[in-house]
């Protein structure tokens, strides 16, 4: 009898241990993401013009007063120029609806931590600096990253004024920030956004650091002030360096050999990198997203998965319709993903110079025709 009791006690303790392990694993694996409302009905109303406003809310007014960024300023566009845009560019309405994809909108805002402020300066407000639409073909499972430049000109569906698309990422009487941005993406592309996830620059750093940094390869040694310096070739970079490289607008390249004096001062010759623009930043954003996806292949322990999930939990805001199970399933599915098969494209645009000398981007063809040319959809 004593042996039976010992036998039962042994397996009782084992069962209790397994239950504790399962509960602990669930606690570790399933994160407590901050969620935000993402109503398809609200988005439809914005698209149809059911809800419009010409008055900014108090939060946006504060941002407008404090920010020197053109995204929150009135764009100086003459009547003649407006007519030209209307006539020559497809900036208003998509030519066709694009269906057959599960879509995930990734939004990066440029709210900055103190460390980032020290290297890149301070900004006020909250703007969509990264706008990437992940499109997963429901039949072939082929994945496309479609980027929208922050300087892309659109008609604000709430005010009927021309402005940059990143300026639509704001809460007002029409909807919240993500709903407004999703409505404008649908209006110009015909692509319905199913889900969204947003993060800020500080969170971007945390995600990169949680996977031990990512590999960045460049064909020339380059830098921007004291914010970063990348050597020719490949190197592993932490979150702060990666972020500063991604958002750099004043990148310089090394001329000749690097020289440093006895006191450690850089006496090398540097020159501005040619062709750096909003489109350059988009290529870097896509590069980093793909590198992060590639990092998932190396996950072979619960602890490694836990580090990333905790980073995501403390970083991302996701829509209330994107369940934790769905998010976890999507994340885990990328472990065996062939990154060479990811289509990385950007909306087709031309530069347009405004009256005050600033430049914006305008679509130069319908996204429906563009995606056909890129073999993303069938004609």
Image (tube, rainbow, N blue to C red):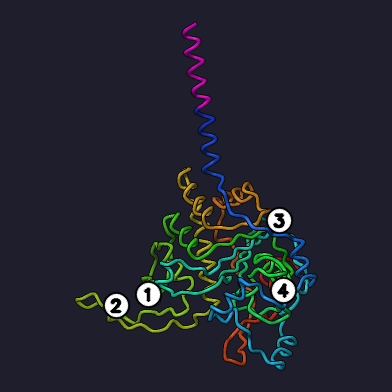
Position of 169 compared to 66: left or right? right
Is there CB contact under 8 Å for labels 2 and 1?
yes
Expressed as whole percent of the image width and height from the top left, the position of residue 364 reads 68, 81
| Label 2: which secondary element | loop
For the residues marked 4 and 1, what is the alpha-carbon distance in whole angstroms?
Answer: 38 Å
Q: Quadrant of the C terminus?
A: bottom right
For the residues marked 2 and 3, what is the alpha-carbon distance in whole angstroms?
Answer: 50 Å
Q: Which mark is residue 164?
A: none
| Label 1: which secondary element | loop
Q: Work out whether mark 4 precedes mark 3 in sequence or the reverse, and give the earlier one.
A: 3
Is there CB contact under 8 Å for labels 4 and 1?
no
Q: Nearer the viewer, mark 4 or mark 1?
A: 4
In the image, residue 315 above or below residue 285: above
Which residue in the protein does label 1 denote? 221
In the image, residue 251 above or below residue 15: below
Position of 259 compared to 48: left or right? left
Q: Work out whether mark 2 precedes mark 3 in sequence or the reverse, and give the earlier one.
A: 3
Position of 179 compared to 34: left or right? right
Picture residue at 68% right of the left edge, 70% below the top: 172
Farthest residue to the front: give it: 58
Which residue in the protein does label 3 denote? 138
Picture residue at 73% right of the left edge, 80% below the top: 160
Which residue in the protein does label 4 denote? 188
């Amino acid at each position: 009898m004593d042996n039976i009791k010992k036998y039962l006690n042994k397996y009782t303790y084992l069962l209790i241990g397994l239950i504790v392990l399962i509960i602990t694993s669930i606690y570790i694996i399933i994160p407590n993401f901050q969620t935000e409302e993402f109503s398809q009905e609200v988005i439809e109303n914005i698209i149809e013009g059911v809800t419009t406003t010409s008055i900014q809310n108090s939060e946006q007014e504060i941002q407008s007063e404090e920010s020197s960024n053109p995204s929150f300023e009135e764009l100086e566009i003459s009547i003649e120029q407006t007519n030209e845009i209307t006539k020559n560019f497809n900036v208003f309405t998509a030519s066709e609806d694009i269906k057959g994809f599960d879509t995930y909108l990734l939004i990066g805002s440029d709210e900055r931590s103190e460390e980032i402020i020290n290297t890149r300066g301070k900004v006020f407000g909250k703007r969509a600096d990264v706008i990437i639409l992940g499109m997963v073909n429901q039949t072939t499972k082929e994945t496309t990253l479609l980027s929208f430049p922050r300087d892309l000109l659109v008609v604000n569906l709430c005010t009927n004024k021309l402005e940059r698309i990143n300026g639509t990422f704001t809460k007002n009487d029409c909807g919240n920030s993500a709903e407004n941005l999703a409505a404008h993406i649908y209006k110009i592309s015909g692509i319905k956004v199913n889900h969204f996830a947003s993060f800020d620059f500080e969170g971007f750093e945390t995600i990169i650091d949680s996977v031990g940094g990512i590999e960045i390869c460049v064909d020339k040694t380059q830098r921007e002030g004291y914010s970063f310096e990348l050597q020719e070739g490949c190197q592993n970079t932490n979150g702060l360096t990666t972020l500063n490289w991604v958002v750099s607008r004043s990148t310089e390249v090394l001329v000749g050999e690097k020289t440093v004096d006895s006191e450690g001062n850089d006496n090398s010759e540097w020159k501005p990198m040619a062709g750096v623009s909003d489109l350059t930043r988009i290529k870097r954003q896509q590069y980093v997203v793909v590198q992060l996806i590639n990092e998932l292949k190396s996950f072979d322990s619960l602890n490694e998965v836990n580090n990333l999930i905790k980073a995501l939990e403390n970083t991302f805001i996701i829509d209330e319709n994107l369940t934790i199970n769905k998010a976890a399933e999507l994340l885990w599915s990328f472990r065996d993903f062939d990154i060479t098969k990811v289509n990385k494209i950007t909306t087709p645009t031309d530069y347009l110079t405004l009256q005050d000398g600033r430049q914006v981007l305008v679509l130069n063809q319908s996204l429906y025709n563009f995606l056909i040319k890129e073999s993303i959809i069938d004609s």
